[in-house]
Amino acid sequence: QEVYRRLAGFHTRLQPYFLTLAQEAHTRGTPLMRAPVLLFPKNPRAWTVDDAFFLGPALYAAPVVRRGQRERSVWLPPSPGRYLELERFKLHAADS
């Protein structure tokens, strides 16, 4: 229940962001969830990512999707270059 409470609160705080993304999707046809290859089509690494996505331009999600797994390696796109891990508030630098 604690995990659900924390993530539900995070989702609620993102509501203004979701509304902005929905308006952009309506006016421009831009999807809310975006594969890295859509944003970085010239980057060969972006073409290999099939289990992470951008939620709009500001959030990058790389969920752990294998049963029993607690962590994983993640390719971080070169732009914006710095990523904040929300779970631990740890700053990560993108691959060059």
Image: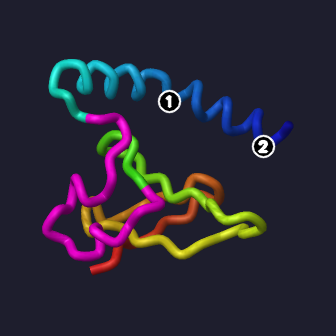
Q: Residue at x 26, y 26 (%)?
A: 25
- Marks 1 and 2, how far apart at CA: 17 Å
Q: Amino acid at mark 1?
A: Leu
Residue 6 x/y as whole percent = 72, 38
- Residue where numbered disc 2 is placed: 3
Residue 4 x/y as whole percent = 76, 37
- Which quadrant of the figure contains the N terminus? top right
- Residue where numbered disc 1 is placed: 14
Residue 74 x/y as whole percent = 48, 71
SS of the residue at dot 2?
helix
Q: Quadrant of residue 88?
A: bottom right
Q: Amino acid at mark 2?
A: Val
Mark 2 or mark 1, which is nearer the start of the sequence? 2
Residue 8 x/y as whole percent = 67, 31
Relative to 60, is 64 on the left or the right? right
Relative to 77, is 41 on the left or the right? left
Q: Is residue 55 part of the magenta span, yes or no?
A: no
Relative to 81, is 64 on the left or the right? right
Determine whether 89 is above or below 75 in the image: above
Determine whether 93 is above or below 60 in the image: below
Which portion, as a residue range, is magenta?
Answer: 31-52
Q: Residue at x 66, y 30 (%)?
A: 9
SS of the residue at dot 1?
loop
